[in-house]
Image (tube, rainbow, N blue to C red):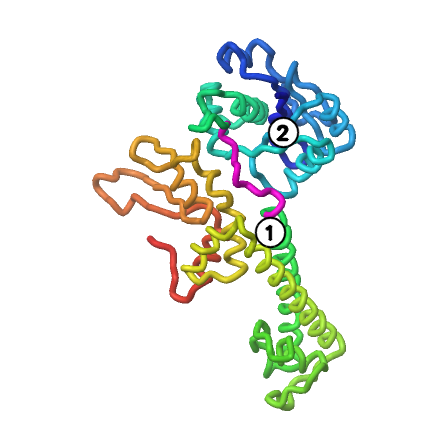
């Protein structure tokens, strides 16, 4: 079996070619093949770092290099759609199998193999390749610790659709801010109305009135200068964005109904999360195995590291900030939450009355 261990960066990746687990320790093996070229992250183009490693950019030449290695499969970590998709599509074109390994597994094995906690792209790629062949990490059925339940295509479809919806919403909000500013002069009586509510006609009644689509009997004469043609166009654009956002949310709902997401959505439904919040949470915690080590929670002493990492991904990780003489003044010890701020904010806003624990 010929494996390519890939550590993905923004527009390039470190690729390590391996056929078996070395007969000596990984640390001795890494020394025997030589260190990679110094400063390789700053070197442009596709280069060979040592006997088994390459730095490849996202281009046609890199695909030809991978093809020349005649590998059977690639193995990499679940990472962002825009980063990993090039290498996944490359493997599909070349008829290679695709395996996934959790970030937690890579981190722990890197520390075990090379006695370092420092993240290093080359060592991460080598660790990923070594993990596949490491017999000490096989499960009870003799399988390597890969993420068998990870569906890259489905989660990336969800990620792409979610970000498209977020981009549309961002553009819509920008237009709403412009319209509100203009209405303060043109029609101050409706400048602060709710533009998010969608009426029975499929658009906001106030926006429909401004755009000239349908008169709203509740809107009377104004003491302002009157609605301008430009404001009418803004209102039409906002309605168009609301329609496109509604379509994207419908697509998100369909993706969430896929079988592989059912266990996750069953939990989300218990908290009455909406479609957008469900999608955001799923993007951060799928697959749940990414937080485990050999399929089980990882403990360091009495601390559940897997749980802590899971909480951080959802915006609920915490740490202590200590200053001065803590024995005299306990108020100098501050416990604060960290992690995904976007997730934390969504969790707070998704249900009325919810708040982050202190």
Q: Is residue 145 magenta?
A: yes
Task: Name the quadrant containing residue 59.
Answer: top right
The magenta region covers: 144-154
Q: As drawn, which residue projects farthest toward the left?
A: 328
Q: Residue at x 49, y 26 (%)?
A: 118
- Residue 17 in the image, given as x and y percentages of width and height: 64, 20
Q: Which mark is residue 158?
A: 1
The residue where tag 2 is placed is: 74
Task: Name the quadrant containing residue 88.
Answer: top right
Q: Is residue 305 magenta?
A: no
Query: Which secondary structure type mostly characterizes the magenta part of the structure?
Result: loop
| Helix, strand or loop under label 2 | strand
Q: Nearer the viewer, residue 183 or 85?
A: 85
Please say if 10 is above or below 248: above
Q: Residue at x 21, y 41 (%)?
A: 328
| Helix, strand or loop under label 1 | helix
Sort mark 1 into few (<14), some (14-19) or many (20+) by Cα contacts within 10 Å: many
């Amino acid at each position: 079996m010929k494996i390519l261990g890939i550590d993905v960066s923004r527009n390039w990746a470190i690729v390590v070619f391996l056929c078996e687990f070395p007969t000596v320790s990984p640390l001795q093996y890494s020394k025997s093949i030589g260190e990679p070229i110094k400063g390789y992250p700053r070197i442009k183009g596709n280069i060979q770092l040592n006997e088994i490693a390459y730095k490849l950019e996202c281009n046609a030449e890199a695909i030809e290099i991978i093809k020349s290695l005649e590998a059977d499969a690639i193995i990499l970590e679940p990472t962002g759609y825009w980063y990993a998709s090039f290498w996944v599509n490359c493997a599909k074109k070349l008829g290679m199998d695709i395996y996934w390994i959790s970030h937690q597994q890579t981190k722990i094995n890197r520390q075990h193999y090379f006695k370092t906690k420092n993240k290093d792209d080359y060592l991460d790629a080598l660790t990923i390749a070594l993990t596949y062949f490491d017999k000490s990490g096989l499960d009870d059925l003799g399988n390597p610790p890969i993420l068998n339940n990870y569906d890259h295509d489905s989660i990336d479809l969800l990620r792409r659709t979610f970000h498209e919806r977020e981009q549309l919403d961002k553009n819509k909000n920008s237009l709403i801010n412009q319209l509100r500013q203009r209405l303060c002069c043109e029609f101050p009586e409706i400048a602060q109305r709710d533009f998010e509510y969608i009426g029975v006609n499929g658009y906001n009644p106030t926006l429909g009135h401004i755009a000239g689509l349908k008169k709203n009997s509740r809107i009377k004469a104004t003491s302002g200068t009157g609605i301008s043609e430009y404001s009418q166009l803004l209102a039409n654009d906002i309605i168009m964005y609301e329609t496109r956002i509604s379509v994207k949310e419908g697509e998100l709902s369909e993706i969430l109904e896929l079988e592989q997401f059912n266990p996750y959505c069953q939990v989300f439904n218990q908290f009455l999360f909406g479609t957008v919040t469900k999608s955001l949470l799923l993007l951060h915690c799928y697959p749940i195995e990414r937080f485990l080590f050999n399929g089980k929670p990882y403990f360091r002493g009495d601390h559940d590291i897997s749980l802590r990492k899971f909480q951080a991904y959802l915006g609920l990780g915490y740490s202590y900030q200590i200053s001065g003489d803590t024995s005299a003044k306990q108020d100098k010890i501050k416990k604060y939450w960290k992690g995904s701020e976007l997730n934390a904010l969504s969790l707070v806003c998704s249900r009325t009355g919810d708040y982050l624990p202190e």
